Amino acid sequence: MMGIVNATPDSFSDGGLFADPECALHHAQDMVMQGADIIDVGGESTRPGAVPVDAAGQIARVIPVIEALRNSLPAGILISIDTSLAEVAAAALGAGASIINDVTAGLTDPGLLQLAAGRGVPIVLMHMQGTPRTMQDNPQYLNVVEEVLGFLIERAEAAQAAGVAKGNIILDPGIGFGKRKDDNLALLANLGRFTATGYATLLGTSRKRFMGAVCNETRSRELVAATVATTALGVMAGINIFRVHDIRENRQAADVAFAIKQAC
């Protein structure tokens, strides 16, 4: 379980709640007690329509949070930096992070792949059509599963060409990033295609708007049960990491789904 800590004022679900390092630390500690294995810290919102934040701005937001987390969390709890910029990732690794999570799969800053290779750390490569500012402006696919899968394989090969070990590559289909409701549903129905690649996989559906369209619910905080359903589905499909806001509920769903899967 990867718990989300957004050190931002404008993230779609929890913007402004954890920008203060002390608030972020308490929240992360709560998530660890509820079963989080990884804490993912970001200093730039990637919600639809979000404006980019430069490296200096991201560093100012995330480094105090990462330092506080690393000094206080158990050594076995990993910290991930959610960024597309090598400069930010390098500063975060120096402060105690050990995973890079890039929503642009190394396309914004190719130096990120070289950094991951040089430091020998895992990197999450995510699919997104467009940019956060434009991604929901009428995204189009002929075959969303094949296009997203093909993109991720291509980026994984680029990462390996840059020196990243295959075992350090994590693929994320990018649910909600430049996708329509039906695109997201098709990807969720075909998660096995992604887990069958031989790469580790990450699923991030937490509180996302497309589920609200299915459930007739506009409040993101009321989509916990919907998220839990996708977590159970992901476990059965072989997903390795789940990036969520609500750890306890998703941990329970994952544990029960895994026990059922083991009994098959």
Image (cartoon, grey):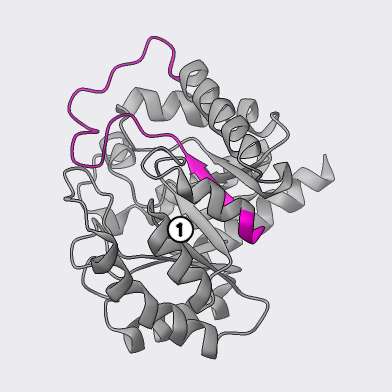
In the rendered structure, which amino acid carries the disc numbered 1?
Answer: Val
The residue identified by callout 1 is 244
Lateral position of residue 25 relative to residue 7, left or right = right
Q: Main secondary structure of the magenta part?
A: loop
Q: Measured from the top left, where is residue 35 in percent x and y? A: 59, 71
Q: Is residue 58 visible?
A: yes
Residue 251, image quadrant:
bottom right
Span shown in magenta: 118-144
Residue 121 to residue 92: above or below: above
Lateral position of residue 107 relative to residue 79, left or right = left
Residue 250 to residue 49: above or below: below
State the residue at coordinates (24%, 45%).
217
Q: How many marks?
A: 1
Residue 182, image quadrant:
top left
Q: Who is closer to the viewer here, 260 or 236?
A: 236
State the residue at coordinates (63%, 44%).
169
